[in-house]
Image (tube, grey):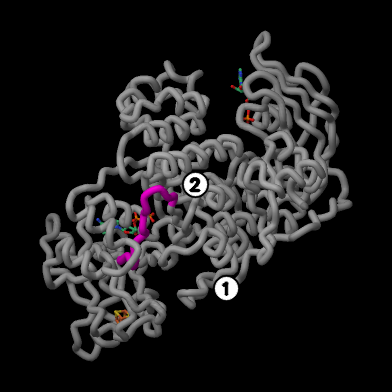
Amino acid sequence: MADDSIAVVDLDRCQPDRCSYECKNYCPPNRTGKECITLRGEETDQGQPEQIHISEEICLGETCGICVEKCPFDAIEIINLPQELQDDPAHRYGENAFSLYGLPAPQEGKVTGILGPNGIGKTTAVRILAGELEPNLGRHDEPVDWDDVLEAYRGTEIQDYIADVRDGEVTVARKPQYVDQIPNTFDGNTRELLEQTDERGELESLVERLSIDPVMDQSIDDLSGGELQRVALAATLARDTDFYFLDEITPYLDIGQRVTAARLIRELAEEEDRSMLVVEHDLAILDLLADTLHVAYGEPGAYGVVTAPKSVRNGINEYLAGYLDNENMRIRPDAIEFEEHAPRTATRADTLVEYPDLTKCYGEDEFTLEVEGGEIRENEVLGIVGPNGIGKSTFAKLLTGNLEPDEGDADLDLEISYKPQYVTIDQHMRVDAFLSSITDQFGSSYWNTEIAQPLQLERIMEQNLSDLSGGERQRVAIAACLSDSADLYLLDEPSAHLDVEQRVQATSAIRRYAEQQDATVLVIDHDIYMMDLLADRLMVFDGEPAVHGRAGTPQSMRDGMNEFLANLEVTFRRDERTSRPRINKPDSQLDKQQRSEGEYYYA
Ligand code: ADP
Ligand code: ADP
Ligand code: SF4
């Protein structure tokens, strides 16, 4: 086939005991007697039929694709690589397996960002940079060692780094992506976990700045997602290594905590001359955090390409535009666009519900929430913002009637479909069975186009809920919430664990759903870009976390953003080219000017 095509067989999906090798029987070259699809010839468990192998030399490429259609388990992908991709891979896991092109280039004293979807080879790249995985340069027929790798990357930004890896001189600390899994691997309390990592003598200050003190003696099992995220950050940054890899820092953190995490990472790079590599899907934070940026693109599970480093501004702009300038590469058909000045003018829709002033106290004086009365409108997306621990979930429970207010009457008589912040669906049940138990629309063309497709559910329908990754579980939970019939849809942190592309898709799925189904949607989230693209109006919470909270009445996006950002003392300017919001440097001229004008977001 054309040199630029690859065949990828997902061996977890290929189950010849349940098909009759339709791929092989229908493959045109096979039918003319060539050995295009063959059996692997590997020993199998107790007489299980052998899995298949596809010859990339003989295969006719994506335009044929017959086997892809024939396979009942979606195990085969035939992909024409973009012609612009001239390099050899850095690594390929084997024939018919995932390949990674290009490598990120960590630099001393700098924060290097990676922007791109999951499944594109970030972990593979980090294992190479950590010296754990010796890349094979995609060559399977000859031995490859670090000297060959160095030769292949001579003259690139990463040459010196590879030389250090070859010489065994790089030490690594890593923060994993899914912090929810930490309790499965550690038994003990926060203090015990953190004390093991205190290699730089900086633990105390990290604990203070990340506000971990209140949970120091708590068992790791009992920490919330946001607490685990901060403990994991402290544990990683407390280590004394050359190279730090942080796979997503923002899930479950509020904006203040996100900004603090970003500052800590920058300080470690700048003041201690360390190399930091960060994968992050919250674009406002990535923008604030990184010095240079690699965009990653490709076909998740099949191949991934890490571009040469770009400036952060250009990298994010090109990513949003869907077109990479230097690579001459379109990565998405449409651009993602932000509105420059005008917040959507508040819609004049009918009122769905009015609620009075409400008060809720937990215990004697543990936490008090005061809600200013307001109205929620039909078919609007109402954004809800504010720090963690300020009473947002409590407000949601007052709306759903799960909690009784101490003052005020919230008897709303509304049916609410609720996606909680921490998604707990993990029964032993298949995704399709779970979703079809929620809606009889399941499988209809409407449901497929509006829900399954934008949330990328097709490929995971046959999987068990308990086997899903964090991002997959999130998408199923959003689908389940929107599929239920209700008066009000309430999504708590839908962005958590979604990659940047999935956030964009989920955003448009939620908006379209609200518009087309005349549904009213409340969204609690900390990702400013997602909120900007999603919400018609905003409800702002403030106060003192864990002590008392105040929920303001819903207001226009402009007024809401100004109030919210004033509480945080953060201002945004607009990128000249794309109008996307960018966080101003504190005390820069623009920051001061906007603050004095009270225009925190729409200057
Ligand atoms: P990311 O970190 O971007 O989500 P990974 O680097 O973990 O991506 O994985 C990229 C692809 O490589 C996945 O499709 C994964 O299934 C595949 N992969 C990872 N490790 C192996 C391996 N040891 N053998 C074959 N394929 C692998
Ligand atoms: P948010 O959703 O903004 O993070 P929550 O509404 O979940 O905030 O919680 C607000 C505060 O109330 C937190 O300090 C939390 O610990 C406390 N809280 C929540 N539920 C209870 C409860 N059932 N009993 C006592 N305190 C609670
Ligand atoms: Fe055969 Fe390639 Fe066509 Fe698949 S895509 S049927 S392997 S020629």
Specify whether residue 229 is painted magenta.
Answer: no
Q: Which residue is mark 1?
A: 333
In the picture, measured across the screen, residue 274 lies left or right of residue 248, that is left
Q: Which residues are magenta?
A: 99-111
Q: Main secondary structure of the magenta part?
A: loop
Seen in the picture, residue 85 relative to 532 is either above or below; the reply is: below
Q: Which residue is mark 2?
A: 497
Q: Where's the N terminus, which quadrant?
A: bottom left
Helix, strand or loop at label 2? It is loop
- Total numbered circles: 2
| Amino acid type of the residue tagged 2 in the rendering | His
Q: Residues within 10 Å of mark 2 (few under 14, many from 20)?
A: many
Left/right placement of residue 464 relative to residue 127 reads right
Q: Nearer the viewer, residue 454 or 558?
A: 558
Residue 134 % position (x, y):
20, 58
The quarter of the image that holds ligand 2 is: top right
Q: Is residue 51 visible?
A: no
Ligand 1 neighbours mark 1 (CB distance < 8 Å): no
Residue 104 is one of the magenta-drawn residues = yes
